[in-house]
Amino acid sequence: MEKKIITISREFGSGGRTLGRLIADKLNIPFYDKELVDQVAVESGFAPKFVEEHGEHSPSSSLFSYAFAPQGVPGIMNGLSTADFLWNIQCNVILQLAEKGPCVIVGRNADYILKDRPDALHIFTHADVAFRAERIVSRYGESEKSPEARLQEKDKRRRVNYQHYTGRTWGQSQNYDLCFNTGVLGIEQCADIVVGIVENSRK
Amino acid sequence: MEKKIITISREFGSGGRTLGRLIADKLNIPFYDKELVDQVAVESGFAPKFVEEHGEHSPSSSLFSYAFAPQGVPGIMNGLSTADFLWNIQCNVILQLAEKGPCVIVGRNADYILKDRPDALHIFTHADVAFRAERIVSRYGESEKSPEARLQEKDKRRRVNYQHYTGRTWGQSQNYDLCFNTGVLGIEQCADIVVGIVENSRK
């Protein structure tokens, strides 16, 4: 079965987004990450910044966020929390993007949303704390919190969000076709492996 | 860092042993599985069959097995249960095998035992139930139990054993450098990927 859709889930700082961009460039197919967020934002009426902050976070952290719903939105939310409302829209957007043709989708629980597509290849990336801490500081700069605390906080939110909406354990290998320790293997090598798999799947 | 030691942990029926054999053949390095069991057996004084059955099983299932300890062994077990006694010997054997030189080691929680060796590459293999059920029937034949029940039982034992001795979750991607869905990727392709990684690590 030809693999056309690549989903990438990732620990914060493990380079999943960079890996996705590399794969998309090498295969010359669309890459959806910020673009996906923007599309969700447009469809929901939420500000892009709000969607980006809440799209992968724990549902409970959004319980207080009804107040931030954009004008006109509460009426169409049908009693859903902001998090559940965004989740429904994200599911639809991701299903539509996959229908459009080959692509790479990073984050947003796309592995689960597209689990029934046999032409999808699901990837998870992780790395040890030292590798990721150094990476987020060099990419996103320092902050008041220690890099380790930032990693822990962001990963916790992704874990809780994934558990809540999929009933699965985030990072459990059986949910993915391939899991990489990017710190050990290197992001470039991981990209080459995925490209090789996609090319082999066409034979 | 050159990767010299390959450990493979696996869901029952996912082809981890076949993968290990392929990698060892392609890299022309020793392969330890049954051989390892025999070595453990010799060091412990237990019958090879007994070691094979208890080496990866849940500790609790071995609580009644003092009675099976070979003559002379109870005296050197220092009050350890059979399972703990075997675990200690397995740790020592695996550490010694890794010291001897490049090799592939399948099972026996070798990923954990060798977690501090930077020249070790840790792999986990899994696949969906249909793929594994067909595989165990074609390799090991039918039995009174359904293939699904056999998979579930054996995996549960491995999971409990791993959790007990390592404190980690079996199959959680972060414990391994690479996880493969062998049903999706094919065992031969997984072997080529690993061989490529080992060869790249020498450059």
Image (spheres, coloured by chain):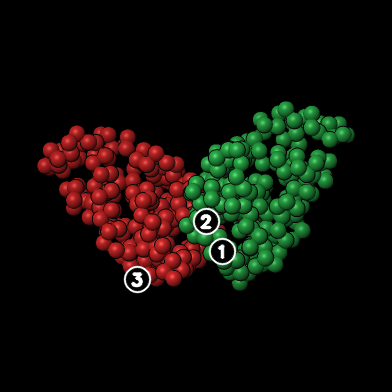
Chain colours: A green, B red
Q: CA distance from mark 2 to mark 1?
A: 9 Å
Residue type highlighted by circle 3: Asn
Residue type highlighted by circle 2: Thr
Residue A115 visible, this angle: no
Q: Chain of mark 2?
A: A
x and y percentages locating residue B113 in the rendered image? 33, 49
Front position in the image: A15 or B152: A15
Give yes or no for contact between labels 3 and 1 (Cβ–Cβ under 8 Å): no
Q: Are marks 2 and 1 on the same chain?
A: yes
Residue position marked by numbered label 2 in the rendering = A182
Tag 2's secondary structure? helix
Q: Chain of mark 3?
A: B
Front position in the image: B63 or A95: A95
Front position in the image: A149 or A85: A149
Residue position marked by numbered label 3 in the rendering = B28
x and y percentages locating residue A85 in the rendered image? 76, 36
Residue position marked by numbered label 1 in the rendering = A188
Q: Chain of mark 1?
A: A
Please give the name of the residue rendered at 34% of the width and 57% of the height, measured from the top-left corner: B105
